Amino acid sequence: MKKYIAVRTKFWIGHAIAALWTTFSIIVSLPWVFELGIIVSLPIAVFIIAGISYLPGYVNAFMVVSLLLDRQPSFKVSDPDIPITIIIACHNEEKNIGTTLKYIKQQDYRGIINTIVVDNNSSDETGKIAMEAAEELSLPVQILREPKPGKNHALNKALKYVDTEYVITLDADTLLHKSAVRYLVSRKESAPQGVCAVAGAVLVRNSRKNFIARIQEWDYFLGIASIKRLQGLYQGTLVAQGAFSLYETRVIKDLKGWPDAIGEDIVLTWNFLKNNSLVYFEPLAVAFTEVPVTMKHLTRQRSRWARGMIEALKLIKPWKQPMMYVRYMTGINLIMPYLDFVYTFCWIPGLVLAFFGKFWIVGPYTLFVLPLCILQNYILYNYQKSVFRRLDLRIRKNKLGFIFYVLFYQMLMSPMSILGYIQELLNLSRVWK
C-alpha cells in the first residue's frame, strides 16, 4: 500500500523542486543571458530568456513532480443509478447528431438518462435528424429549438427543462465511451461535499483524417490531459468543458445558467471556484471529439480558447479566488499572454536565426528544456496507457505526429493565442464554431 501524501504537502514539494530546477537553470544560463544582453540589453535579455526558459521550466517542473505524486482516489460508488440529463447544443450538426445519440444509447449506466437536443438556429436538418434517430434507437429525447445564436442561449434553454440532480453537457460531434457516463457520475457520487462539477477526459476521434488532426491527438492525449490531472489533483480543474462534463443542476441554476461569453464553460467553472465549490477531473470518463482538420478552423478554435481565458481573467481575478490552489492555477493564466508573446516574437525568430548560425536566442542552452518536456510526456504516456488498458482501448501508432507535437506544436499554438488576445482586446465579434 502506497503512503498517502496530503494535497498541501504535494503542493509545496512540487514548488520546492521546481524552485531548485529553476535556480539550476538560471545558474547554467548566465553566459547565455550576458551574451544576449550585449545585443539587446540586459533587461530585454532577461525578459526574453525568462519567457523561453525560466517560467516554463518552473511550471513544467511543478507539473512533473505533482503528477509523480498524484494518486487518483478509488470510487466509493462504482455503479450509480441516479437519474441524469444530457444536454446537446447543436448548430448545423445533421451529420453527427445521429451517431452521438447512438453512443448515448450504448451506455452501460444503470440509471435513467434523459437527453435534450437543442437546435441552435441551424440552417440544416439537425432537429429532424435528431428526432428520427431518437425514434429509431427508442431513446427518450426531447428536441428544442433556440433561434437566438450562441451556445449559452441553447444550453440555458435546455436548463429550464432539467429536473434531475445532475446534468451533463455533450457536444454534438463527441462520442462517449460505453462507460463514460458511469465513471463521470461515479466520481461525483464518490467526491466529498463541495464538489459541484466533474470534467470528463476528451480525446481525439478523427486523428486519421490528416496530419493536423494527428498532431492534436497528442495534445489532447498528453498536453490537455496532463493539465487537467494537475488541476484536478489540486481540486480546481479550471475548465469543466462543455464538450463533456457533469454539473450539479442546482448550482448552475443558482448562477443563472451559462454566461454570455465566448468561453461560457470557462467563466462558469471559475464562478464555481469563486464560490468555494470544487471541480474534479475523471480520466476514466472518456469521450472522443472531432478536432479541426484545417489550419483555418484550428486557428479559429484556439484563438477562441485564448479569448475565453482572457474573458474569465477580466471577470474573475485570480487573487480573489478563495482557495489557495485555485489562486495559483488561475494565476498561471496571467502569465500566458507574456509567454505566448515571447514564444511568437522572440523564440520563433530566434529559431530562424539559428539556421543562419546566429545562436543568440535559440542555441545549446535551450536544449535544457527538452529533458523536462520528454520526462513530462513519458509520465503522462504511461499513465494514459494504464487508463486505456482499463477501458479496453488501444493507443494508435502516431510517431511522426508525436515528434512534431513535442518539437513544433507550440509554434502553432502561441501565434493562434496571440490572435485571440488581439481579438478580445479589439472586442471583435464572436464565432461559436
Image: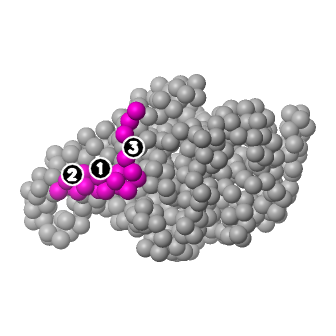
Res 36 seen here: yes
What residue lies at 37% left-to-right and 65% top-to-bottom? 335
User: Label 3: which residue?
Assistant: 4
Rendered position, 152 above or below 187: below
For marks 3 and 2, the one nearer the N-term is 3
Q: Is residue 150 left or right of residue 17?
A: right
**Numbered disc 1: secondary structure:** helix
User: Label 2: which residue?
Assistant: 21
User: Label 1: which residue?
Assistant: 61
Q: Amino acid at mark 2?
A: Trp
Q: Which residues are magenta?
A: 1-23
Q: Chief secondary structure of the magenta span? A: helix
- What's the coloring here? one colour
- Real-space CA distance between mark 1 and mark 2, rounded to the nearest whole angstrom: 7 Å
Q: Is residue 257 left or right of residue 423?
A: right
What residue lies at 48% left-to-right and 29% top-to-bottom? 386
